[in-house]
Structure formats: structure tokens, C-alpha cells
Amino acid sequence: MLADLKSLNPDFSRRGFVGTALAATGFALAAGPARAEAIVTDTAGLETADVLIPARDRSLPAYAARPAEATGPLPTVMVVQEIFGVHEHIRDVCRRLAKLGYLAVAPELYVRQGDPSKISDIPTLLKTIVASVPDEQVLADLDSVATWAAKSAGGDPKKLAITGFCWGGRIVWLYAAHNPMLKAGVAWYGRLVGDASANSPKHPVDIAAELKAPVLGLYGGADQGISPDSVEKMRAALKGAKVKTEIKVYDGAPHAFHADYRPSYRAEPAKDGWMQLQAWLKANGVG
């Protein structure tokens, strides 16, 4: 049993529940109508819950999933949201990882800036919330999640990994340069280059040589927001890395090809990417 879940949420059970930590469930409004074929992973054999994780200045809402009958410390994967926050797709990814034997935790990293579930269009979401989130805040929050997972949720601090999508894919690269305890990262179509700003002083290409954990990058060859040139710049920068790295590009795949609830979903690259993720985690000691 997740040690702190009963104290934080007395009604927690293996069936999961609608708690007070994350008020919104379902898919994000700004992502548009969800595809009827969106993948749904059930909670059979799992413990799932909305939780509150102590962070520097407040409690951090998160969604957690793990195998119900697990004994001993579990390999842990932090799941970093798309721009849409911790909505149903991200929760489902956590359940998929839990079915594989992981403790999966997805923190709501916009909690201080606003509620992305209330915004109906992407430009407004980017302007009013996403642009206001400092990288430093995100990295510190992820440190808090890693600490909580090890101390209160049965996670193994020696088997810590991170994966993220879109906005979260960029964060994976940054976190791999931040936390020396991290064992592996898998970044799904995260932005690699950009202009420096107060909230985002560096981008993945700037910290490639500073990576402390192996990172696998999964990208779409037809991504209109992440150019082939930026991918090649990152590959060149990674030559200076002291850890193992790999970037795989799926020809013809658009941005968000793993997002099975959106029209951008491409089944074959998504399925292959998921297999690549599993192999990468195991190859780097998180499994």
C-alpha cells in the first residue's frame, strides 16, 4: 500500500477514487474532442490515487499508480505532462506503467500558475499558464516527487526514471542534467532549441553535455514544431555527453504521435516508441 495515501486520503482503495488533490478528470478542453478509440487502461490489479506531495512552498497534486500486490521497493517513473496538464491521457500512461510493474507518478506542475483544464484553446493556455512556469520551479518539484516516491510510496530511489510528452519531453532532457540520482529518461517529442528567457534560461541543446543520466529521444519526422535541423543540432550536441543517448525519428509521424486521444495519433510509431521506452528503462537499470 502506498504509505501516505491513507493519511492524505482516508478513502483511498485499490479501485481508486476521485480525491480533492486534482479536481479535474477526463481529457483537457484545449486538446479538442477525444477520439472514440482512445486507449483506456483499467485499474485491475493496481492501486491508484490522487495524492498531495509535499513540495517547497505548498502541497503538489499528483496522480499515482502502482501494482496492488507488489512487495519491496518499486522502480519509479515520473511522468511529465503535456501542455494540457495531468488529464486522462497522462493518468492512463501512469496506469500502463503500473501494469508493467512500476510506481508511476504524474505531478501537476502548473498548480501555482493556474488550472489548464479550464482553458478551451491552446494559444490562451500557452500565454496564460505555460509561459509563466519557470524551469527551476519544475525541476525542484520533480525533486520533491522523487523524494516522496522513495519515502512514502514504496519507490526505489536507486531505480528512478522520468518520461514526458511534448512540454514534458523538453523537461526530461533538463531533468536528466539536473538530478545525478536519475537512472534513465525517455523524452517524447520535446522541444530541443529555443530563445533564452527568465523562465527558460536553457534548452536541451544547451545542456546536452551536462546530462547525468541516459536519455532516449523519440521524435516525429513530420513534426511541424520541431524541425529536422533542431534534431540534428541536438545530435551534434550530444556527442559531448558523458552518458548514453539516442534519438529515434519516425518518418512521417507528426507531433504528439503517441497521443492516442488526438487525431495526431499514429499507431505504429506509438507502439514502437512504447516498446523502445520499456527496453531503454530495463537496459539502464530501471526495471
Image (cartoon, rainbow, N blue to C red):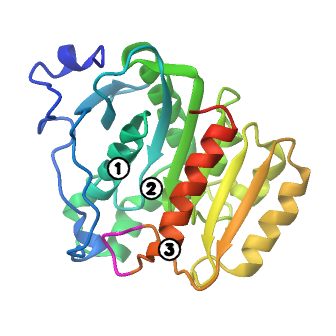
Mark 1 neighbour density, 10 Å: few (under 14) some (14–19) many (20 or more): some
Q: Which residue is mark 2?
A: 132
Q: Main secondary structure of the magenta part?
A: loop
Look at the numbered disc 3 and give the secondary structure of its residue. helix
Residues in magenta?
259-263
Under mark 3, the amino acid is Glu
Label 2 to label 3: alpha-carbon separation: 35 Å
Instruction: Nearest to the eye among marks 1 and 3: give it.
Output: 3
Q: Is residue 218 visible?
A: yes
| Front residue (pair 211, 184) | 184
- The label on residue 268 is 3
Residue at left offset 32%, top offset 35%: 65
Task: Mark 1 or mark 2: name the one nearer the start of the chain.
Answer: 1
| Front residue (pair 125, 179) | 179
Q: Quadrant of the N terminus?
A: top left
Q: Quadrant of residue 71?
A: top left
Look at the numbered disc 1 and give the secondary structure of its residue. loop
Instruction: Nearest to the eye among marks 2 and 3: give it.
Output: 3
Look at the numbered disc 2 and give the secondary structure of its residue. helix
- Say if mark 1 contacts mark 2, CB within 8 Å: yes
Instruction: Identify whether 182 is placed above or below 149.
Output: below
Q: Quadrant of the C terminus?
A: top right
Q: Give the image location of residue 155, x and y in percent.
A: 46, 21
| Front residue (pair 194, 9) | 9
- The label on residue 125 is none
- The label on residue 113 is 1
